[in-house]
Image (tube, rainbow, N blue to C red):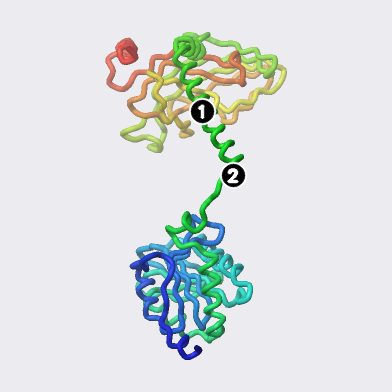
């Protein structure tokens, strides 16, 4: 009966127990004739949740309750949290409202309003990107003071449609079980077997050929390695490279300014001399082509540093060297203060023969000698 439905109190659905959030507690003060649905997955976006759906005379309200703390305000239609713009949250709330509106073709998109309800002091009030902004202190006033646009029967019908279309949080698997076909089960079983067999084959291959792999890696890293200061000529016809390059020095350098220096890092410089023997222009990015190999094979975050140094000028990056031209300069790296290196290389192409290498003995600060460092590395490798 109409009178009974008008006196019906607000109902709560969704999660087994209504969430104990400021907005959820505030919505319990809604008068009869309103329906509240808590904790529902968004349509087609199961990872996102609609915190509260409120249906009543004033329309359908999709309420998102972000767990923010701190200062929240709106100025010029822009929502800010602790001074930072929150346009992404506004767009997400608007998208949730639009998704719910598509489930209610008989209601109309204008009667479905997205709401961001943020627990803030003073209470939030305004509109941003078509999303209504409020706080738990004024959310009931916001909903109940709007003009009545939904008849009681239409509101009940909208609630029923949303309950059928949306899945409560925590109940998605029970309400929508997945049924695998025979072909699907066969495909997944075959895939799982193939993955296991492939993994076992790789392990067996690695165990059987461990020494071979290790020797190959060692030879690749150290083959054709020259003594520091020796010129190396790279002549790769496929790459079009004909260049003689010399790593003259590898040493600690000093920056002209304090930038890039600290207690835990140091600046390591590589001085290179290059002579372009080709009839074409040589193009090279020294900061990417020059590589330092650390002792013990540790992986250090070696990042090229471009700060000017007292020892000389830096190589241009990228470098453009004309035919028959010669240039000399430094490439500087910012490395951990305790890092040690035993090889430097310069790559001019993709093939193995387009790499020039030199042996170096860069000690950690405070080490007695490079020989002691090498002995320590050898003992650790055993």
Give residue 288's position: percent from left, percent from top. 54, 28
Q: Which comes sooner in the sequence, label 2 or label 1?
A: 2
Which residue is outermost to the front?
182
Is the C-beta separation of discs 2 and 1 under 8 Å? Answer: no
Circle number at residue 314: 1
Circle number at residue 356: none
> In the picture shown, does residue 177 fall above or below 160?
above
Q: Nearer the viewer, residue 291 or 13?
A: 13
Q: Nearer the viewer, residue 21 or 345?
A: 21
Residue at 37% x, 34% y: name it: 261
Whether residue 282 can be seen here: yes
Give residue 330's position: percent from left, percent from top. 49, 24
> In the picture shown, does residue 96 fall above or below 177?
below
Residue at 46% x, 20% y: name it: 203
C-alpha separation, residue under disc 2 versus residue under disc 1: 65 Å
Residue at 47% x, 86% y: name it: 5
Whether residue 86 can be seen here: no
Q: Is residue 53 left or right of residue 326?
A: left
Q: Is residue 301 left or right of residue 198?
A: left
Circle number at residue 181: 2
Q: Quadrant of residue 380?
A: top left
> In the picture shown, does residue 187 fall above or below 230?
below
Residue at 28% x, 18% y: name it: 367
* Kind of element beneath mark 1: loop
Give residue 15's position: percent from left, percent from top. 40, 65
Please tell me whether mark 2 or mark 1 is closer to you in this view. Answer: 2
Circle 1 Cα neighbour tier, 10 Å, few/some/many (<14 / 14–19 / ≥20): many
Which residue is outermost to the right?
279
Quick one: quadrant of the C terminus? Answer: top left
């Amino acid at each position: 009966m109409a009178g009974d439905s008008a006196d019906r109190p607000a109902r709560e659905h969704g999660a087994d127990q209504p969430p104990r959030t400021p907005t959820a507690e505030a919505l319990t003060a809604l008068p009869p004739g309103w329906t509240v649905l808590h904790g529902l997955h968004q349509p087609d976006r199961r990872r996102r949740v609609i915190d509260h759906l409120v249906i009543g005379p004033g329309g359908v309200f999709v309420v998102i309750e972000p767990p923010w703390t701190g200062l929240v305000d709106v100025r010029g239609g822009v929502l800010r949290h602790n001074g930072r713009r929150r346009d992404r949250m506004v767009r997400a709330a608007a998208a949730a409202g639009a998704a719910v509106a598509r489930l209610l073709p008989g209601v109309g998109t204008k009667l479905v309003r997205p709401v961001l309800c943020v627990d803030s002091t003073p209470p939030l009030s305004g509109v941003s990107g078509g999303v209504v902004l409020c706080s738990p202190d004024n959310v009931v006033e916001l909903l109940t003071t709007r003009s009545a646009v939904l008849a009681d029967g239409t509101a009940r019908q909208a609630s029923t449609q949303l309950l059928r279309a949306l899945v409560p949080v925590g109940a998605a698997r029970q309400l929508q079980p997945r049924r695998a076909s025979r072909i699907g089960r066969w495909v997944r079983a075959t895939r799982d077997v193939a993955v296991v067999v492939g993994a076992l084959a790789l392990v067996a291959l690695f165990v059987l050929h461990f020494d071979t792999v290790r020797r190959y890696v060692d030879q690749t890293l150290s083959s054709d390695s020259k003594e520091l200061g020796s010129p190396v000529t790279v002549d790769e016809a496929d790459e079009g490279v004909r260049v003689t390059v010399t790593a003259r020095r590898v040493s600690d350098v000093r920056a002209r300014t304090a930038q890039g220096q600290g207690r835990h890092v140091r600046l390591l410089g590589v001085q290179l001399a290059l002579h372009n023997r080709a009839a074409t222009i040589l193009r090279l990015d020294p900061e990417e082509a020059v590589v330092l190999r650390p002792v013990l094979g540790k992986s250090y975050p070696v990042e090229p540093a471009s700060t000017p140094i007292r020892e000389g000028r830096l190589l241009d990056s990228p470098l453009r060297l004309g035919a028959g031209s010669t240039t000399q300069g430094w490439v500087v790296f910012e490395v951990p203060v305790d890092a040690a290196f035993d090889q430097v290389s310069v790559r001019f192409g993709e093939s193995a023969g387009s790499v020039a290498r030199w042996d170096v003995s860069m000690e950690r600060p405070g080490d007695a000698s490079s020989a002691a460092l090498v002995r320590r590395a050898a003992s650790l490798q055993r």
